[in-house]
Image: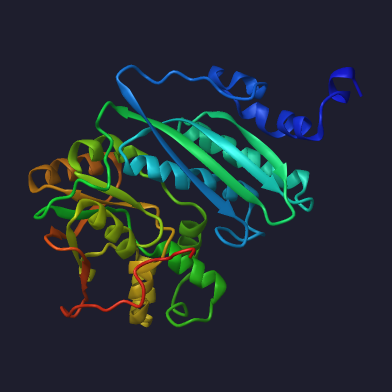
Amino acid sequence: MDQKTSILSGEDRLIDRFFRPLVKDAGALGLFDDAACITPPAGHDIVLTVDASIAGVHFFADDPADLVAKKSLRVNLSDLAAKGARPLGALLSLSIPETVSEDWLAAFSHGLGADLDQFGCPLLGGDTTRTTGGTTISITAIGTVPRGSMVKRSGARPGEHVVVTGTLGDSSLGLELRKRPDAPGFAQLGDDEKAHLAERYLLPQPRLALADALREAATAAIDISDGLVGDLAKLASASGVAAHIEAKSVPLSPAARVVLAGAPERLETVLTGGDDYEIAAAVPENRLAALKEAAKEAGVMVTTIGRIETGDSVTVRGPNGQPLTLKRASFSHF
């Protein structure tokens, strides 16, 4: 053991082995300091967001470590995308029990590094600790937008279209499939369809490719993390408006359609289940075509599912044309 190694703490050695190799931005100071120092682009605002991922709550303890790392980063990047922001960097706080192996840490750091590179989001610093509980990952994502242009929840106005990216319900159905594979609706799924639902739960797709277009078109937006109806209600409340959704217009994957064909009651899972990490936005009529054209060029599906109205609630019309009553609006920790 050389002198340098001998004076390092266990935490220092962990950082040195698994996380310092991920650092590629000079502002991180090689992870040798207590803080990072970065300069945002001239004429831009800083956008900050943080989400925690906890074993047994947000992921299964036996999920592949590289995918746990990627999901932990991507849920934060989804928040940046919904604000029309581009990533500037990220901070990682990792709390692990003694049962976590070096192989797990190696896979975790490999997955995190791959996604940091893929999404242009350099690691700037963080913290590592032991815990007597389950693994907890907290990532703070830092982004930028041209000054004064962040897309808030609070700008929607009556008459605007409600649009969403991607397909909805896949992740929550994937979670249900994993927990109760014999539940109604899953029997007719093929292997590829099961794999699709599982992947959508494990690996969300942050819509950063649409960030610039969203900033130009949307008056309000939110990432769908707790469920479409509940998250849209948050947007509507912040904007002082109501929203109406046509369930028949909600975009579904082929796998979700198979599930709903066998168990129509699972439509509620699609509308209120969490972990979609897609974007819901309010868009004026005169900006809708431009947004959809930009989305097509970016390879991101955008679908109109309803309208912003006067009032203070979210209503849903079911496939039969009748109002749909839901047991809950969204997932909630409390």
User: Which image quarter: residue 298?
Assistant: top left
Residue displayed at 23% across by 57% down: 236
Q: Measured from the top left, where is residue 66 in percent x and y? A: 61, 46
Question: 141 above or below 98?
Answer: above
Q: Residue 57 vs residue 250: left or right?
A: right
Q: Measured from the top left, where is residue 176 in percent x and y? A: 49, 71
Residue displayed at 52% across by 56% down: 202
Q: Residue 43 vs residue 63: left or right?
A: left
Residue displayed at 44% across by 69% down: 173
Question: 88 above or below 309?
Answer: above
Q: How many marks?
A: 0
Residue displayed at 89% across by 18% down: 3
Res. 207 in view: yes
- Please say which color scheme the image uses: rainbow
User: Which image quarter: residue 139?
Assistant: top right
151 or 207, which lies in front? 151
Q: Measured from the top left, where is residue 117 in percent x and y? A: 51, 31
Q: Residue 173 vs residue 326: left or right?
A: right
Q: Quadrant of the N terminus?
A: top right
Res. 306 in view: no
Q: Measured from the top left, where is residue 2 in percent x and y? A: 90, 20
